[in-house]
Every structure is written in structure tokens, then in C-alpha cells.
Amino acid sequence: MTYTMKQYDMQDNLTRRQVFWLLQRLTSYALWKKKRDAFAIFADEYEIAVKTWPEGDPEYMPADNLSTIYEILGLYDKGLEQLARGYRFIWKDGQPLKLAVNRYYHLCQYFFPHPSYWERGAQLAPYPTKVDRLARLMRASEFQMEQAPFEVAASNDNFAQLQSATLLLDPDRYKYQFYELDYPVFPPSLPEIPASLGPVVESGDEVTADGIWEPVKISRGKVLGLLSVGEKTEENNGCFNYLVKGTHAPNIKGRPDPLTLRSAVTSTHWRLLWEDTRYKDGVIADESQYFLAAKREDAPAELADVPDVKTGDMCPVSGVWRAEKYADSSIHIVAGAVMPDLMVTDNLGERKVHWVTWHLVKRT
């Protein structure tokens, strides 16, 4: 799929508030608990599938994945226990929640290594129906940019996890070749960004507090273009990032080299916007705002009680269904049937299979 590049201005007030809220969401207990619970459902279904898969079926699920699956589940449980007490080292290298996601990515690479669908750690074609059902259950535990609080990698020039708000705000970034992640629903009123007086650290320095930090340029006026005078000014220098105390403040990417296309490694200052002290008092507040349901303004009253369903789900009501974002996709589906995928022409003119969300438009 070709991504549609959009630019998001980090000096725009709405963009700043959306990114701030999304970083709080991605580092909340509620989101990581939701990830763990969704993965547990997948783990149970995968074990059942391994035990009941027809003998002689060449398209079988690898039993070897079970050890990785239950390793991941154990890491989630350990990490959540510590997050519930306000500990955030769990996103550092070698710690439970970062390990859990790293092992999850490994599982995705070797989920179904059948030569007709897989090559060198990458899915090449839509999975068979039974396999696809399990793959969707697995992906239900995944969130866009869930790696936002992770310690940055020295092997990647210590670049910040979030180089652009595009990764969080552009809906196209939630769409992958064979699956799509849910786009978050923002609450009606987003909190304002708190006024921050610091502290300020520089790339490479030790981060002094868990929380959301803003990259800034620090400058002073100059006399005759040489001598710096007057008070310092701090100007936004990129996308907010969630940094964990005790890690090293990351770099940001500069302009790519025109010959090698490699991004320049650029140092910056980071100013603390919000210190994350959630759960340290042993209390997990109501975090239901992070998982609001999307409203369908155009749904008639008689359809309001029928939930949207996704490719592979069971159709709850016989009728005419339409795929979200595809106005000419209406088809009739009977109750109990499996909701289909959709063939979509991408920007290059190639037709590819997409998982979609279906809305009921007429009962029959």
C-alpha cells in the first residue's frame, strides 16, 4: 500500500493536544491491559486450533508457536503488575513490556511460514480462512505506535521513536497490506497542554522524569551576529515523545543525505511537558475515555442497535452491508455468514485484498 503523506504542524494547538492525549493513551494501564486481554483470547484460540486441526491438512498451525505465545502472555502479566504500581522501567531494554512486544513481532514473522503465503519473515498473500481468523485475533492486541515509550536503540542512531505526528494522526498509517488497526476516537474535549517550566535535557543526557517531553530549539538574541544576549527562547523542534526516566534522551532526524538518503543525526534539547505519576499511589483511575466508540451520525434509528463488524466476523443480521470508506461496496449478506474482505485498487492501480469494517444499511 502507498501511504498518503500528510503534514501535521506541531505548533498547531489541536495537533499538539491530540498527540499529547495519544501519548497518554499509549502509556496507560488501560491500553496495556487491553492488549494483554486480547492476546489471551488469541492464545486460547490458537491452542485449541493446534489441538483440533485436521490431520493431514498441509495448511496447519505450527505448534512451536505456543511456547512463544505463552512467553509473551507471561511478560504481559509481569509488566502489568509493575505498571499498576507506577513503575515505568518496564519499557526499557530487557524489561517485560518491551520484551513482550519484541517477542510479539517475532511471532508475527513466523506465525504461518507456509511457502504459499510467507517468505523470509514476511506475509506475501492473504491467509486461508481458518488461519486468517487466528491472525485477526492476534492483531486485535496491536496498537499503532505502541512502541512509543520504548527505550531508543543505539543501533538506530538513538533516534526518537516518534519523528512525526503523522505516525499517530494520519489514518493511512493505520492501514497495512493485510490488516488494519483501529483509529482512536478522541473525546469531545481534549485537555490543554500544561504550561511547562522544564526541566530541560539534551540528546544523550539522562532523562530525569517519566513523561511527555517536547524537543525544543534554545536560542538567544545576538549583538552584531556574534555575542548571545538576553533571555533564552525555546521553540518547538518536532514531535512530542514519551521518555522513561533513566534512559538517554534521543536524537531527531535531520535532512537526509542526497547521495546516501540516510537521515542526518541531529541533537536537540528536550523540555518536560508532563511528568507521569499515574498509579504510584496504587490507584488506577477510570480510563474509559481512551476507548470511546465511534458514532455513526447517519445511521437510522432502526439500525442503531446493530454493531459494526469486520472482515472474518460472523454477520449478526441479514441485510445490505457497506464497507466503511467504500461507498460502492454494498452487498447482501445473510445472518451467520462470514463477513468478506474487499478487493481495493491502490494508488498504483494494483488490486489487493483489504480487511474492512462493515456497516448495516438495510435490514432484509
Image (spheres, grey):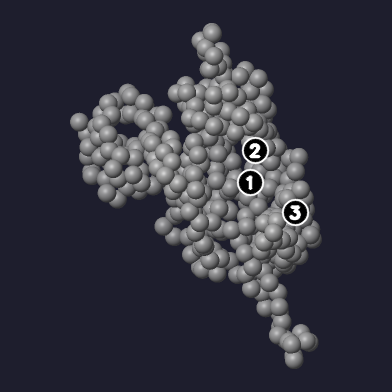
Q: Quadrant of residue 68?
A: top right
What residue is drawn where x is 63% and y is 50%?
148
Q: Are marks 2 and 1 in contact (CB under 8 Å)?
A: yes
Secondary element under disc 3, as helix, strand or loop, is: loop
Q: Residue furthest top?
A: 55
Q: CA distance from mark 2 to mark 1?
A: 8 Å
Q: Position of residue 303 (x, y in %)?
A: 25, 39
Task: Report the mark closest to the observer, 3 or 2.
Answer: 3
Residue 157, numbered circle: 3
Question: Where is 337 relative to 215, above or below?
Answer: above
Secondary element under disc 2, as helix, strand or loop, is: helix
Q: Are marks 3 and 1 in contact (CB under 8 Å)?
A: no
What residue is drawn where x is 74% and y is 54%?
158
Q: Amino acid at mark 3?
A: Asp
Residue 208 shows in this picture: no
Q: Which residue is mark 1?
A: 147
What residue is drawn where x is 28% and y is 43%?
328
